[in-house]
Image (cartoon, grey):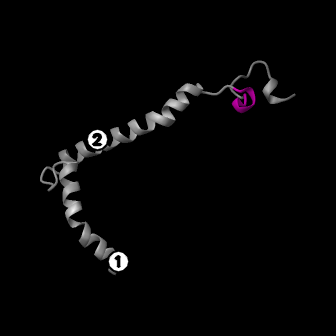
Amino acid sequence: MDWRRQAGDRSRIDHRATGSGPVSPAAFVWFGNTGTYLLIGGMLAVEFAVRIWRFPDYRFKNPLQFAREARLRMPNIVAALKNG
C-alpha cells in the first residue's frame, strides 16, 4: 500500500504531490519578497543598538558618520588594496 494513501496518517503526506503546502502561497510570497528585507533591517537595528550599548566610547555614533568617514578614506583603502 502506498504510504500517501494511508487513511489515518496525514503527517506523512508529500505536500508536493498533493498541491498543498505547510504555508499558503500568499504567505510564502510575502515573506520571500518583503518579510526577508524587514527581518534583515530589524537584525541590523538590533545589532546597532547592542553595539552602542556594549561599546559606549566607540568613535562612530551613527551609520551616517561612519559612511562619511569611509568615503573620506576610500582613496587610501583603494590604494592599499591595489598595492596588496
Residue bearing the label numbered 1: 82
Pick the quarter of the image with the C terminus. Answer: bottom left
- Residue at 15%, 54% in the rendered image: 58
Above or below — where is 58 with respect to 49? below
Q: Which residue is mark 2?
A: 45
Q: Quadrant of residue 5?
A: top right
The residue sitting at 33% across, 81% down in the picture is 83
For the point 84% across and 29% down, which residue is it? 2
Q: Residues within 10 Å of mark 1 (few under 14, many from 20)?
A: few
Q: Is residue 12 above or below residue 40?
A: above
* Structural distance between the alpha carbons of marks 1 and 2: 33 Å
Residue 59 position, x and y percent, is 14, 56
Q: Determine which of the numbered discs, if any, sits on residue 61 in the image.
A: none
Q: Quadrant of the N terminus?
A: top right
Count of labels in the image: 2
* Callout 2 amino acid: Ala
Which is nearer the eye, 38 or 76? 76
Magenta span contains residue 80: no
User: Residue 26's image quarter?
Assistant: top right
Residues shaded magenta: 13-19
